[in-house]
Image (tube, coloured by chain):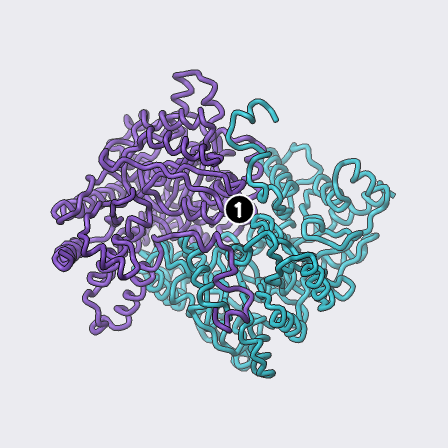
Chain colours: A purple, B cyan
Amino acid sequence: MSTTTQLRSLNIDNINPHVKEAKYAVRGELAVRAEKYRQKLSDNKQDAGLPFDTVISANIGNPQQLDQKPLTFFRQVASLLENPLLLEHEKVLTDSLGYKQDVIDRARWLLDDVKSVGAYSGSQGTPGIRKSVAKFCESESTSIVLLRPTLTTTPERDGYPADPDSIYLTAGASSGVNTLMHIICASPSTGVLVPIPQYPLYTATLSLLDGRCVPYYLDEKNNWGTSMESIEKSLKEAKAAGTDVRAIVIINPGNPTGATLSADEIKSIITVAADEKLVVLADEVYQNNIFEGSFVSFKKALRELQASTKDKKYDTVELASLHSISKGMVGECGHRGGYMELIGFDPEVVQEIYKFVSISLCPPVVGQAFVEMMVNPPQEGEPSYELYKKEYDGIFAGLKKRAMALYDAFKEMEGVTCNSPTGSMYLFPSITLTEKAKQKAKDDGKSPDEFYVSKLLDATGVCMVPGSGFGQEEGTLHFRTTFLAPGTDWVGRITKFHADFMKEFK
Amino acid sequence: MSTTTQLRSLNIDNINPHVKEAKYAVRGELAVRAEKYRQKLSDNKQDAGLPFDTVISANIGNPQQLDQKPLTFFRQVASLLENPLLLEHEKVLTDSLGYKQDVIDRARWLLDDVKSVGAYSGSQGTPGIRKSVAKFCESESTSIVLLRPTLTTTPERDGYPADPDSIYLTAGASSGVNTLMHIICASPSTGVLVPIPQYPLYTATLSLLDGRCVPYYLDEKNNWGTSMESIEKSLKEAKAAGTDVRAIVIINPGNPTGATLSADEIKSIITVAADEKLVVLADEVYQNNIFEGSFVSFKKALRELQASTKDKKYDTVELASLHSISKGMVGECGHRGGYMELIGFDPEVVQEIYKFVSISLCPPVVGQAFVEMMVNPPQEGEPSYELYKKEYDGIFAGLKKRAMALYDAFKEMEGVTCNSPTGSMYLFPSITLTEKAKQKAKDDGKSPDEFYVSKLLDATGVCMVPGSGFGQEEGTLHFRTTFLAPGTDWVGRITKFHADFMKEFK
């Protein structure tokens, strides 16, 4: 410890140890280095002294930082929410600026609900927007299929009632997870089942709250499926170790895996939760990013179980379903919006959840408005529908195309195996490195996957995240990449780097 | 515990006890009841069965929920950030919609910095906006006075350098406080000096983190001044009790008190912080809400101390200065924007702060843009200046007028004493209640101030917060009210209620 350090109140040895323990590789050292490269290139593109001319941030699902254009309807409405005085010029809006009547109507309706996007709303979110979310959860997608030509633009879902009072709007799904974990983690022996690999928000939040991560391993050989045996084994071991396991996290579709659960798999998980008294934390933010199979919500599966079995044990299952405007075809990460639906929680516990969220006042109000538009987009026959559908379908097709291109490249790479893209925004290939590469990594004080990804960044400007940032089975190595970046040039850079790397460390 | 409760994972007896301990009266039971009344009135205004026809939310500083109109320049720019396609129609914007050239230029500049308001920014905020904030902190207000006719619209401040890398944009000041407290609170014996009365975010966050609140009392008789004796006494007692006191919170201008600290008072506090190794948490969100005296930032006072004394002990003072777009004449609470400047922190600690904020990805990007406009508003000679200044000065004058009207009413009320309004958005009068009223409160299971404020809400629809929500010296009673609501009708309601109350409980 330096003398200067001793002169201060805080130093690395005396701050909150739980903050120090928390790990969040998605925005870690590699991401910081990538930003430095980007700055260098922006300061002096011709002569930055780097072997690449662009930085590709494939470390995080941030669509609009890359190629994705925002949905026009959403942004037109938002522009009116920000400047309601524009509504005094309807003719200019429609005749000169191409705003359709449904844009204007939606803005007026939302303004009536929020009063001003500059005012705090209720801590749970505005009443009108929560009603829209409930309606979205409630609507039956089968009835909608008949009304609409394709399913990609129809967000309605379950066919079971939803209560606006059970909807909590949030500043993105992360903030909802933070709230729930705060309630659940009561002591250092509290445990939460977390899939491995996982999105590191879960382990980071458990570290901050001094709770225990109880890992259950997803089955890579079975397309990253969720194995009930793995959950039951982990649960048993944790209990034997004195862990008070209170909740299970499921990410469906998976991050980083992209795997989508079937209705039967979901019902098996809910049954374990009912038997073992586990809160189900269903991270469903990728519910619209599905290339194979179809999305079944935990809520729908729970209601079906209740209806088909009449077993009372399902009536008290505590389920929190999380959704977000950051993913899907919306991709409005910067607006920080999302919601969670709370089902089956004890009312006294719900009161504490309310108090907890009230301390941070309210989620961003514009973000709340984007949630409303996500769950209630233009419908067929409405003036903005055609453009909305074209944009939405275009984004979906683009994502699928890029995912396949990247997958095809990985398939060809020596020592790399990758499951076919099924959903979410990521691929999570497995990589086999030579002993020589592993030794060099060790000499550099890095794990082998970190070493590989670090070298990749320095050589190509492509920023990915090592598998160790998400957790992986002992002895395996992976990396996660988004497939959001446009073009194929960057895929070529990866292929070339990989060949060179394998040659260097043969 | 009911049978149903036992069937669940979570119940009120087994959730995180620190969440249960946390108190946040500003949005507590009274605020919830006020919302119910509002809903009742909105459902059936004619026959809601209530003795009032409007609810006045004087419990929270939420200007745009009441009368305050947003600043036009800010909202015009924001509308372009939300829909950049409008920038393809410059002529329509300027000729038909009254957008000035500086609005268009600012939007282009901000879009260049953020790329899209729908993209995640860096976790610390965008580079360009952080540069603007640093420039604002840095600029010397004295030089600006010469350039501008009045000071009300000139936000520049200190005259000492500021580093954009030390600026962290936040989702409102609350989020900055949450970050800092997470770093500081290392164990249950960690203590933080908090002024009493205080904004309850501080005690709530300390409860959540299982830290100790070390109260120091503000001097009501001396216009809610900060007494060094009180700070030193509290510190001594806390140390004797084994508390590891690591930080001191100062709210300047005060919430709920409105008191503004002089440069000398600030320097005395900084000197104690330097001697005792305390992080200074300077909550400066009301820096533009000042009716008497003038604002001196802790940063400026620190730099002056360093320059004048040459004492090395000031070089390692750790200071976090917090600001927000929610207050001042901006009042954009719903956009959740703010920043903190970190001065003198150990670089290793700063890295942990960065990691902590990265877990929640980034503050709302539109909120970041509002921070930029707050610190860099239209300047004299620029096209939008005239309107901006008119609106800004109008809001300032309106707040002052309302504060005085409310103060005048309180002065006339039996058993109420109130310091004259000097700043912030609140009055915090002291009230003397009869034994009969206190007994009735006790019978109702309420503290006397809570009882009074609850009766006030039921009788008039005016929602205030009891002094116990902020802390008050043993044996004293207070309530806090904002002076944001328009008109004087509601002041009359309070006066009449008070007279009736005093008569009933004579």
Vertical order, B232 against A133 (above or below): below
Q: In this view, does A178 lie to the left or right of A308?
A: right
In the rendered structure, the residue with mark 1 lies on which chain? A
Residue that numbered label 1 is attached to = A121
Quarter of the rendering containing residue B354: bottom left
* Residue A74, percent from left and from top: 36, 47
**Residue at x 45%, y 45% (from the top left corner):** A206
* Residue B358, percent from left and from top: 41, 55
Vertical order, B410 against A150 (above or below): below
Residue A245 seen = yes
* Residue A29, percent from left and from top: 34, 60
Asked whether B383 or A328 is in front, the reply is A328
Residue type beneath disc 1: Ser
Count of marks overlaid on the render = 1
* Residue B506, percent from left and from top: 88, 43
Task: For mark 1, give the secondary structure.
Answer: loop
**Residue at x 40%, y 16% (from the top left corner):** A309
Binning the other alpha carbons within 10 Å of mark 1 as few (below 14), some (14 to 19) or many (20 upward) gives many
Asked whether B465 or B360 is in front, the reply is B360
The C terminus of chain A - image quarter: bottom left
Residue B384 seen = no
Q: Is residue B43 left or right of residue A466?
A: right
Asked whether A256 or A207 is in front, the reply is A207
Vertical order, A235 against B490 (above or below): above
Asked whether B75 or A104 is in front, the reply is B75
